[in-house]
Image: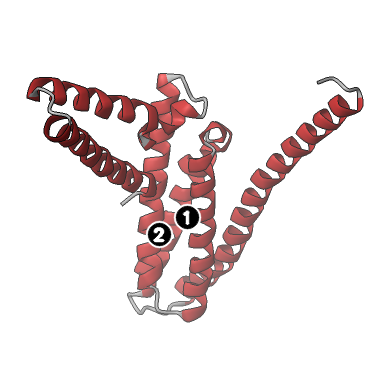
Amino acid sequence: MLIYRKNIIRFDILNTLLGIIIFIVLFAVLKMEIIISGVLALLIYIGSSLLFAPNNKLVLLGIKDSNKQKEYMDLLDNGYENYEKISKLRNQLTKPEIKAKCTLIVNQIAKILKYLEKHPNKIGQNKKFFTYYLEAILKIINSYNDISTQNVHTKEIEEVMDKTEKSLTLIEKSLEEQFSKMLQNDALDLDTEIDLLNNSINMKDF
């Protein structure tokens, strides 16, 4: 199951329990009428859902455009689905060194997905990661796994398999560079904020 979808389910369960507890307190402890207790508990449940539910995270972090909200959530959904498919394929590989390379790739993908989930405002800048790179990685590993299980060893197939194995190293390095670039952009933003704050302090503009 997708990571942020798990958070949504967990929140829904806890929020429902909170609503039930509030209803019991209002009705059984404070002796309010059952209809009033139910309405108040329901209003608190709805208010909590609107303000704190994880599925409203994109709105809370500044993604107010409804079309972008849907687009970015769809990209995350698709990204996590491809991540899970790649993880399952990795587990099916029998060659230890190739499995190890795919493990590094899976770990890099997880880092990027978690980062973009936490910083949804940066999903638009990295759409190609979802729409091309993940799809291509999945296709390459899937094809490699299919061919390797056939136990056919012609010269042409061996050359393709060797080329694929070398490409996995390049893929892992590319993902690492992509993640490092995301963090570097954050570091530059932080550096700019620090400079602005220092200038403000030096000018006693507070």
> Relative to 102, does residue 13 appear above or below in the rendering?
above
Tell me: 64 left or right of 47: right
Question: Where's residue 6, x and y in %?
Answer: 32, 48
Real-space CA distance between mark 1 and mark 2, rounded to the nearest whole angstrom: 8 Å
Residue 89 position by quadrant: bottom left
- Residue drawn at 85 percent across, 25 percent down: 200
Question: Where's residue 41, x and y in %?
Answer: 20, 27
Label 1, secondary structure: give it. Answer: helix
The number of numbered discs placed on residues in the rendered structure image is 2
Numbered label attached to residue 167:
none
Question: Where's residue 149, x and y in %?
Answer: 34, 75
Asked if marks 1 and 2 touch (Cβ < 8 Å), the reply is yes
Query: How many C-alpha atoms fall within 10 Å of the one at disc 2: few (<14), some, or many (≥20)?
Result: many
> Relative to 196, does residue 127 appear above or below in the rendering?
below
Residue furthest to the front in view is: 30
Numbered label attached to residue 137:
1
Label 2, secondary structure: give it. Answer: helix
Q: Amino acid at mark 2?
A: Ile
- Residue drawn at 56 percent across, 38 percent down: 126
